[in-house]
Protein backbone atom coordinates (compact mmCIF):
# COMPACT_ATOMS: atom_id res chain seq x y z
CA UNK A 1 0.00 0.00 0.00
CA UNK A 2 1.26 3.47 -0.83
CA UNK A 3 2.21 5.41 2.25
CA UNK A 4 2.15 9.19 2.49
CA UNK A 5 4.94 10.83 4.46
CA UNK A 6 3.96 14.38 5.34
CA UNK A 7 6.35 17.14 6.35
CA UNK A 8 5.36 16.49 9.96
CA UNK A 9 6.11 12.78 9.63
CA UNK A 10 9.49 13.49 8.04
CA UNK A 11 10.45 16.10 10.62
CA UNK A 12 9.56 13.81 13.50
CA UNK A 13 11.72 10.90 12.30
CA UNK A 14 14.54 9.86 14.63
CA UNK A 15 17.80 11.41 13.36
CA UNK A 16 19.53 8.26 12.12
CA UNK A 17 16.31 6.87 10.61
CA UNK A 18 15.78 10.13 8.75
CA UNK A 19 19.37 10.21 7.45
CA UNK A 20 18.91 6.71 6.01
CA UNK A 21 15.45 7.49 4.59
CA UNK A 22 16.36 10.84 3.00
CA UNK A 23 19.63 9.49 1.60
CA UNK A 24 17.62 6.87 -0.30
CA UNK A 25 15.14 9.25 -1.90
CA UNK A 26 17.25 10.74 -4.68
CA UNK A 27 17.77 7.32 -6.25
CA UNK A 28 20.94 5.41 -7.07
CA UNK A 29 24.01 7.57 -6.66
CA UNK A 30 27.40 8.28 -8.18
CA UNK A 31 30.04 7.00 -5.80
CA UNK A 32 33.80 7.36 -6.01
CA UNK A 33 36.92 7.42 -3.88
CA UNK A 34 38.47 10.86 -3.61
CA UNK A 35 42.27 10.79 -3.33
CA UNK A 36 44.19 13.77 -1.95
CA UNK A 37 47.58 14.67 -0.49
CA UNK A 38 48.52 17.63 1.68
CA UNK A 39 51.64 19.78 1.20
CA UNK A 40 53.51 17.70 3.77
CA UNK A 41 52.94 14.63 1.58
CA UNK A 42 50.33 12.91 3.76
CA UNK A 43 47.66 11.16 1.68
CA UNK A 44 43.95 10.80 2.33
CA UNK A 45 41.24 8.71 0.72
CA UNK A 46 37.49 9.11 1.28
CA UNK A 47 34.31 7.77 -0.26
CA UNK A 48 31.89 10.36 -1.66
CA UNK A 49 28.38 9.54 -2.88
CA UNK A 50 27.26 13.02 -3.81
CA UNK A 51 29.18 13.45 -7.05
CA UNK A 52 27.40 15.04 -9.99
CA UNK A 53 28.09 16.04 -13.57
CA UNK A 54 28.09 19.80 -13.89
CA UNK A 55 29.08 20.33 -17.50
CA UNK A 56 31.17 19.02 -20.38
CA UNK A 57 32.72 22.25 -21.68
CA UNK A 58 34.68 22.99 -19.58
CA UNK A 59 34.54 19.46 -18.09
CA UNK A 60 33.26 20.06 -14.55
CA UNK A 61 32.30 17.75 -11.69
CA UNK A 62 30.64 18.77 -8.43
CA UNK A 63 30.56 17.07 -5.05
CA UNK A 64 29.14 17.87 -1.63
CA UNK A 65 31.39 18.15 1.43
CA UNK A 66 30.09 18.09 5.00
CA UNK A 67 32.69 20.04 7.01
CA UNK A 68 31.78 18.26 10.26
CA UNK A 69 32.54 14.79 8.81
CA UNK A 70 35.58 12.75 7.80
CA UNK A 71 35.23 14.43 4.43
CA UNK A 72 36.85 17.54 5.92
CA UNK A 73 40.32 16.00 5.61
CA UNK A 74 39.81 15.59 1.87
CA UNK A 75 38.46 19.12 1.65
CA UNK A 76 41.38 20.65 3.53
CA UNK A 77 43.84 18.86 1.25
CA UNK A 78 41.96 20.02 -1.85
CA UNK A 79 42.08 23.62 -0.63
CA UNK A 80 45.78 23.26 0.18
CA UNK A 81 46.95 21.82 -3.14
CA UNK A 82 44.08 22.29 -5.59
CA UNK A 83 44.37 18.71 -6.85
CA UNK A 84 42.26 15.61 -6.22
CA UNK A 85 41.28 12.38 -7.96
CA UNK A 86 38.02 10.48 -8.46
CA UNK A 87 38.36 6.71 -8.60
CA UNK A 88 35.37 4.51 -9.39
CA UNK A 89 34.41 1.68 -7.08
CA UNK A 90 34.12 -1.85 -8.39
CA UNK A 91 33.12 -5.22 -6.96
CA UNK A 92 36.64 -6.04 -5.75
CA UNK A 93 37.09 -2.89 -3.66
CA UNK A 94 33.69 -1.69 -2.49
CA UNK A 95 34.18 -2.99 1.05
CA UNK A 96 37.59 -1.29 1.27
CA UNK A 97 35.98 1.86 -0.17
CA UNK A 98 33.17 1.81 2.42
CA UNK A 99 35.76 1.42 5.17
CA UNK A 100 37.34 4.79 4.23
CA UNK A 101 34.29 6.43 5.84
CA UNK A 102 35.54 5.38 9.29
CA UNK A 103 36.92 8.20 11.43
CA UNK A 104 40.62 7.56 11.09
CA UNK A 105 43.02 10.02 12.65
CA UNK A 106 44.38 12.79 10.49
CA UNK A 107 47.90 11.36 10.56
CA UNK A 108 46.66 7.98 9.27
CA UNK A 109 46.23 7.33 5.55
CA UNK A 110 43.10 5.46 4.49
CA UNK A 111 45.12 4.02 1.60
CA UNK A 112 47.10 1.97 4.06
CA UNK A 113 44.35 1.37 6.63
CA UNK A 114 41.82 0.26 4.02
CA UNK A 115 44.26 -1.76 1.92
CA UNK A 116 44.08 0.24 -1.28
CA UNK A 117 47.16 1.09 -3.31
CA UNK A 118 48.12 4.71 -3.92
CA UNK A 119 49.60 5.34 -7.32
CA UNK A 120 50.79 8.41 -9.23
CA UNK A 121 50.19 8.78 -12.94
CA UNK A 122 51.25 11.26 -15.62
CA UNK A 123 52.79 13.72 -13.15
CA UNK A 124 49.44 14.33 -11.43
CA UNK A 125 49.99 15.71 -7.92
CA UNK A 126 47.15 13.78 -6.20
CA UNK A 127 47.14 10.03 -5.60
CA UNK A 128 45.02 7.62 -7.64
CA UNK A 129 43.66 4.26 -6.44
CA UNK A 130 45.50 1.60 -8.39
CA UNK A 131 42.64 -0.94 -8.08
CA UNK A 132 40.12 1.44 -9.65
CA UNK A 133 39.48 1.03 -13.37
CA UNK A 134 38.23 4.58 -14.04
CA UNK A 135 40.53 7.31 -12.69
CA UNK A 136 39.88 11.03 -13.10
CA UNK A 137 42.27 13.83 -12.09
CA UNK A 138 40.72 17.17 -11.13
CA UNK A 139 41.79 20.71 -10.35
CA UNK A 140 39.72 22.76 -7.90
CA UNK A 141 37.94 25.58 -9.73
CA UNK A 142 35.28 26.87 -7.33
CA UNK A 143 33.44 26.24 -4.08
CA UNK A 144 29.88 27.24 -3.16
CA UNK A 145 28.78 27.38 0.44
CA UNK A 146 25.19 26.21 1.02
CA UNK A 147 24.01 28.29 3.94
CA UNK A 148 20.89 26.15 4.47
CA UNK A 149 22.87 23.31 6.02
CA UNK A 150 26.45 24.55 6.09
CA UNK A 151 27.73 22.19 3.42
CA UNK A 152 30.10 23.08 0.60
CA UNK A 153 29.87 22.21 -3.07
CA UNK A 154 33.34 21.62 -4.46
CA UNK A 155 33.69 22.12 -8.21
CA UNK A 156 36.62 20.65 -10.09
CA UNK A 157 37.73 20.65 -13.69
CA UNK A 158 38.77 17.33 -15.22
CA UNK A 159 42.44 17.54 -16.17
CA UNK A 160 43.23 13.93 -16.97
CA UNK A 161 41.57 10.52 -17.28
CA UNK A 162 42.95 6.98 -17.16
CA UNK A 163 40.85 4.01 -18.28
CA UNK A 164 40.81 0.91 -20.43
CA UNK A 165 40.68 1.92 -24.06
CA UNK A 166 38.47 -1.08 -24.89
CA UNK A 167 35.50 0.25 -22.88
CA UNK A 168 35.09 3.44 -24.98
CA UNK A 169 32.53 3.37 -27.78
CA UNK A 170 33.21 5.20 -31.05
CA UNK A 171 30.89 8.02 -29.94
CA UNK A 172 32.71 8.65 -26.63
CA UNK A 173 30.37 6.61 -24.41
CA UNK A 174 32.17 4.81 -21.59
CA UNK A 175 30.82 1.34 -20.81
CA UNK A 176 30.85 1.55 -17.02
CA UNK A 177 29.64 -2.02 -16.71
CA UNK A 178 32.64 -3.23 -18.67
CA UNK A 179 34.75 -1.12 -16.30
CA UNK A 180 33.10 -2.93 -13.38
CA UNK A 181 31.92 0.37 -11.89
CA UNK A 182 29.09 0.13 -9.37
CA UNK A 183 26.46 2.41 -7.82
CA UNK A 184 25.14 2.90 -4.29
CA UNK A 185 21.91 3.79 -2.56
CA UNK A 186 21.13 5.15 0.85
CA UNK A 187 24.13 5.33 3.15
CA UNK A 188 25.51 1.83 2.84
CA UNK A 189 24.02 -0.23 -0.02
CA UNK A 190 26.12 -1.16 -3.06
CA UNK A 191 24.79 -2.40 -6.39
CA UNK A 192 26.11 -3.69 -9.67
CA UNK A 193 24.12 -2.87 -12.79
CA UNK A 194 22.65 -4.48 -15.88
CA UNK A 195 22.13 -2.34 -18.94
CA UNK A 196 18.61 -2.16 -20.35
CA UNK A 197 19.78 -0.12 -23.33
CA UNK A 198 21.01 3.10 -24.78
CA UNK A 199 18.34 5.29 -26.37
CA UNK A 200 18.65 7.55 -29.40
CA UNK A 201 18.67 11.34 -29.02
CA UNK A 202 15.09 12.37 -28.30
CA UNK A 203 13.17 14.43 -30.85
CA UNK A 204 9.58 15.66 -30.62
CA UNK A 205 6.77 13.71 -32.30
CA UNK A 206 8.77 10.50 -32.74
CA UNK A 207 9.85 7.84 -30.25
CA UNK A 208 13.40 6.93 -29.19
CA UNK A 209 14.95 3.69 -30.43
CA UNK A 210 17.66 1.49 -28.94
CA UNK A 211 21.14 2.28 -30.26
CA UNK B 1 45.39 -1.38 -22.36
CA UNK B 2 44.98 1.65 -20.13
CA UNK B 3 44.74 4.85 -22.09
CA UNK B 4 45.78 8.25 -20.77
CA UNK B 5 43.62 11.20 -21.75
CA UNK B 6 45.54 14.43 -21.17
CA UNK B 7 44.01 17.87 -20.83
CA UNK B 8 44.98 18.52 -24.45
CA UNK B 9 43.29 15.31 -25.61
CA UNK B 10 40.11 16.15 -23.69
CA UNK B 11 40.01 19.75 -24.94
CA UNK B 12 40.44 18.68 -28.53
CA UNK B 13 37.54 16.19 -28.49
CA UNK B 14 34.68 16.95 -30.87
CA UNK B 15 31.86 18.63 -28.92
CA UNK B 16 29.30 15.81 -28.98
CA UNK B 17 31.98 13.15 -28.34
CA UNK B 18 33.22 15.12 -25.35
CA UNK B 19 29.71 15.57 -23.93
CA UNK B 20 29.17 11.81 -24.08
CA UNK B 21 32.62 11.03 -22.66
CA UNK B 22 32.53 13.54 -19.79
CA UNK B 23 28.94 12.65 -18.88
CA UNK B 24 30.10 9.06 -18.33
CA UNK B 25 33.01 9.85 -16.03
CA UNK B 26 31.20 10.58 -12.78
CA UNK B 27 29.72 7.07 -12.69
CA UNK B 28 26.14 5.88 -12.55
CA UNK B 29 23.75 8.73 -11.88
CA UNK B 30 20.57 9.62 -10.02
CA UNK B 31 17.84 10.12 -12.57
CA UNK B 32 14.29 11.34 -12.02
CA UNK B 33 11.42 13.04 -13.76
CA UNK B 34 10.82 16.58 -12.52
CA UNK B 35 7.16 17.59 -12.59
CA UNK B 36 6.15 21.26 -12.53
CA UNK B 37 3.18 23.52 -13.31
CA UNK B 38 3.18 27.24 -14.04
CA UNK B 39 0.70 29.74 -12.57
CA UNK B 40 -1.49 29.44 -15.64
CA UNK B 41 -1.87 25.70 -14.92
CA UNK B 42 0.32 24.39 -17.75
CA UNK B 43 2.32 21.34 -16.71
CA UNK B 44 5.85 20.33 -17.66
CA UNK B 45 7.84 17.15 -17.19
CA UNK B 46 11.59 16.77 -17.75
CA UNK B 47 14.23 14.14 -17.06
CA UNK B 48 17.15 15.23 -14.86
CA UNK B 49 20.26 13.11 -14.29
CA UNK B 50 22.18 15.50 -12.09
CA UNK B 51 20.26 15.05 -8.85
CA UNK B 52 22.23 14.81 -5.61
CA UNK B 53 21.62 14.40 -1.90
CA UNK B 54 22.58 17.57 -0.08
CA UNK B 55 21.53 16.84 3.48
CA UNK B 56 19.03 15.05 5.70
CA UNK B 57 18.29 17.75 8.28
CA UNK B 58 16.71 19.76 6.76
CA UNK B 59 16.02 17.23 3.97
CA UNK B 60 17.61 18.86 0.91
CA UNK B 61 18.09 17.75 -2.68
CA UNK B 62 20.15 19.54 -5.33
CA UNK B 63 19.96 19.40 -9.12
CA UNK B 64 21.72 21.13 -12.00
CA UNK B 65 19.80 23.20 -14.54
CA UNK B 66 21.23 24.26 -17.89
CA UNK B 67 19.35 27.45 -18.81
CA UNK B 68 19.94 26.96 -22.54
CA UNK B 69 18.25 23.53 -22.57
CA UNK B 70 14.74 22.12 -22.33
CA UNK B 71 15.31 22.14 -18.58
CA UNK B 72 14.63 25.88 -18.59
CA UNK B 73 10.86 25.30 -18.74
CA UNK B 74 11.05 23.30 -15.52
CA UNK B 75 13.26 25.94 -13.96
CA UNK B 76 10.94 28.79 -14.89
CA UNK B 77 7.98 26.93 -13.40
CA UNK B 78 9.92 26.21 -10.21
CA UNK B 79 10.80 29.89 -9.84
CA UNK B 80 7.17 30.86 -10.53
CA UNK B 81 5.48 28.56 -8.02
CA UNK B 82 8.24 27.23 -5.75
CA UNK B 83 6.97 23.66 -6.06
CA UNK B 84 8.24 20.64 -7.99
CA UNK B 85 8.25 16.87 -7.78
CA UNK B 86 10.88 14.16 -8.27
CA UNK B 87 9.58 10.87 -9.66
CA UNK B 88 11.87 7.85 -9.99
CA UNK B 89 12.20 6.07 -13.30
CA UNK B 90 11.49 2.36 -13.55
CA UNK B 91 11.68 -0.27 -16.30
CA UNK B 92 8.14 0.41 -17.52
CA UNK B 93 8.61 4.14 -18.12
CA UNK B 94 12.28 4.79 -18.89
CA UNK B 95 11.67 5.21 -22.62
CA UNK B 96 8.83 7.66 -21.94
CA UNK B 97 11.10 9.43 -19.46
CA UNK B 98 13.94 9.72 -21.98
CA UNK B 99 11.50 11.16 -24.50
CA UNK B 100 10.79 14.12 -22.19
CA UNK B 101 14.24 15.44 -23.17
CA UNK B 102 12.96 16.24 -26.69
CA UNK B 103 12.47 19.94 -27.42
CA UNK B 104 8.72 20.20 -27.15
CA UNK B 105 7.14 23.61 -27.44
CA UNK B 106 6.41 25.51 -24.27
CA UNK B 107 2.65 25.18 -24.72
CA UNK B 108 2.91 21.39 -24.97
CA UNK B 109 2.93 19.20 -21.86
CA UNK B 110 5.42 16.32 -21.84
CA UNK B 111 2.95 14.38 -19.68
CA UNK B 112 0.64 14.12 -22.65
CA UNK B 113 3.28 13.92 -25.40
CA UNK B 114 5.30 11.23 -23.60
CA UNK B 115 2.31 9.23 -22.36
CA UNK B 116 2.81 9.65 -18.65
CA UNK B 117 -0.05 10.35 -16.26
CA UNK B 118 -0.09 13.52 -14.19
CA UNK B 119 -1.55 13.07 -10.75
CA UNK B 120 -2.01 15.29 -7.70
CA UNK B 121 -1.52 13.95 -4.18
CA UNK B 122 -2.07 15.30 -0.68
CA UNK B 123 -2.76 18.86 -1.84
CA UNK B 124 0.70 19.24 -3.35
CA UNK B 125 0.72 22.01 -5.98
CA UNK B 126 3.05 20.32 -8.48
CA UNK B 127 2.13 17.25 -10.56
CA UNK B 128 3.44 13.77 -9.80
CA UNK B 129 3.96 10.97 -12.32
CA UNK B 130 1.39 8.30 -11.52
CA UNK B 131 3.51 5.47 -12.99
CA UNK B 132 6.48 6.28 -10.73
CA UNK B 133 6.78 4.25 -7.53
CA UNK B 134 8.85 6.77 -5.56
CA UNK B 135 7.42 10.29 -5.55
CA UNK B 136 8.96 13.23 -3.71
CA UNK B 137 7.45 16.70 -3.37
CA UNK B 138 9.85 19.63 -2.97
CA UNK B 139 9.77 23.34 -2.18
CA UNK B 140 12.44 25.58 -3.71
CA UNK B 141 14.79 26.86 -1.00
CA UNK B 142 17.80 28.31 -2.80
CA UNK B 143 19.61 28.59 -6.13
CA UNK B 144 23.34 28.92 -6.75
CA UNK B 145 24.64 30.20 -10.05
CA UNK B 146 27.82 28.50 -11.25
CA UNK B 147 29.67 31.21 -13.14
CA UNK B 148 32.17 28.74 -14.67
CA UNK B 149 29.61 27.37 -17.12
CA UNK B 150 26.47 29.43 -16.50
CA UNK B 151 24.49 26.60 -14.93
CA UNK B 152 22.27 26.84 -11.86
CA UNK B 153 22.07 24.52 -8.88
CA UNK B 154 18.49 24.35 -7.66
CA UNK B 155 18.08 23.35 -4.02
CA UNK B 156 14.77 22.05 -2.74
CA UNK B 157 13.49 20.88 0.62
CA UNK B 158 11.56 17.61 0.71
CA UNK B 159 8.01 18.35 1.88
CA UNK B 160 6.28 15.05 1.19
CA UNK B 161 6.98 11.51 -0.01
CA UNK B 162 4.75 8.81 -1.48
CA UNK B 163 5.97 5.22 -1.77
CA UNK B 164 5.08 1.61 -1.08
CA UNK B 165 5.27 0.99 2.64
CA UNK B 166 6.57 -2.55 2.05
CA UNK B 167 9.89 -1.32 0.59
CA UNK B 168 10.99 0.51 3.77
CA UNK B 169 13.28 -1.35 6.15
CA UNK B 170 12.93 -0.89 9.93
CA UNK B 171 15.95 1.44 9.91
CA UNK B 172 14.54 3.81 7.27
CA UNK B 173 16.39 2.31 4.29
CA UNK B 174 14.34 2.34 1.08
CA UNK B 175 14.80 -0.73 -1.12
CA UNK B 176 15.04 1.02 -4.48
CA UNK B 177 15.31 -2.31 -6.29
CA UNK B 178 11.99 -3.39 -4.84
CA UNK B 179 10.63 -0.03 -6.02
CA UNK B 180 11.90 -0.86 -9.50
CA UNK B 181 13.99 2.32 -9.60
CA UNK B 182 16.79 2.42 -12.15
CA UNK B 183 19.99 4.36 -12.79
CA UNK B 184 21.60 5.88 -15.88
CA UNK B 185 25.04 6.54 -17.27
CA UNK B 186 26.34 8.92 -19.87
CA UNK B 187 23.62 10.78 -21.73
CA UNK B 188 21.37 7.94 -22.79
CA UNK B 189 22.12 4.60 -21.10
CA UNK B 190 19.68 3.07 -18.60
CA UNK B 191 20.47 0.29 -16.12
CA UNK B 192 18.69 -1.84 -13.59
CA UNK B 193 20.64 -2.87 -10.51
CA UNK B 194 21.46 -5.93 -8.45
CA UNK B 195 22.34 -5.43 -4.82
CA UNK B 196 25.71 -6.75 -3.64
CA UNK B 197 24.94 -5.88 -0.05
CA UNK B 198 24.51 -3.31 2.67
CA UNK B 199 27.55 -2.71 4.85
CA UNK B 200 27.67 -1.88 8.55
CA UNK B 201 28.64 1.58 9.76
CA UNK B 202 32.41 1.87 9.31
CA UNK B 203 34.64 2.15 12.38
CA UNK B 204 38.45 2.38 12.47
CA UNK B 205 40.55 -0.75 13.06
CA UNK B 206 37.76 -3.22 12.27
CA UNK B 207 36.19 -4.26 8.97
CA UNK B 208 32.58 -3.71 7.83
CA UNK B 209 30.18 -6.65 7.72
CA UNK B 210 27.09 -7.28 5.62
CA UNK B 211 23.87 -6.23 7.34
Image: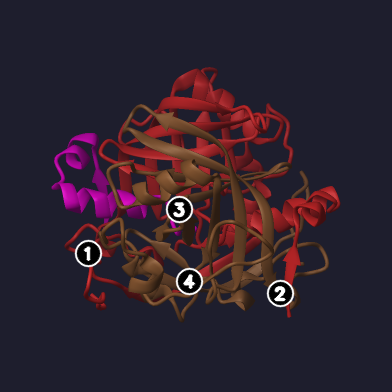
Chain colours: A red, B brown
Residue receiving disc 3: A132
Q: Earlier in the sequence, mark 4 or mark 3?
A: 3
Question: Pointer 3 indicates a residue of which chain?
Answer: A
Secondary structure beneath label 1: loop
Question: Pointer 1 indicates a residue of which chain?
Answer: A
Secondary structure beneath label 3: loop
Residue at mark 2 to residue at mark 4: CA–CA distance:
20 Å
Question: Pointer 2 indicates a residue of which chain?
Answer: B
Q: Decide if residue A209 is in sight here.
A: yes
Give above or below for B56 relative to A188.
Answer: above
Question: In the image, which disc is placed on residue A5?
Answer: none
Percent position of residue B119, x then y: 55, 70
Task: Tell us which disc is closer to us: 2 or 1.
Answer: 2
Who's the residue at 77% across and 67% down the image? B211
Percent position of residue B118, x then y: 50, 70
Q: Label 4: few (<14), some or many (≥20) within 10 Å? A: many
Residue at mark 4 to residue at mark 3: CA–CA distance:
17 Å
Residue receiving disc 2: B167
Residue receiving disc 4: A193
Q: How many labels does the image show?
A: 4
Residue receiving disc 1: A169
Give above or below for B203 relative to A107.
Answer: below
Is the same chain shared between marks 2 and 4?
no
Who's the residue at 71% across and 41% down the image? B58
Who's the residue at 48% across and 59% down the image? B35
Is residue B141 located in the magenta-colored stretch of the structure?
A: no
Task: Tell us which disc is closer to us: 2 or 4.
Answer: 2
Kindly indicate whether the residue at mark 3 contacts the one at mark 4 (C-beta within 8 angstroms): no
Amino acid sequence: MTKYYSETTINSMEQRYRATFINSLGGFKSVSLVGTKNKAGKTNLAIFNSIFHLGANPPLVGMVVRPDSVERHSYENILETGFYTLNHLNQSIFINAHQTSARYKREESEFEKCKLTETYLSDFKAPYVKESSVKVGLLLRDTKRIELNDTIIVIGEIKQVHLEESIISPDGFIDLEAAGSITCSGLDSYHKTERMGRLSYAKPYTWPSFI
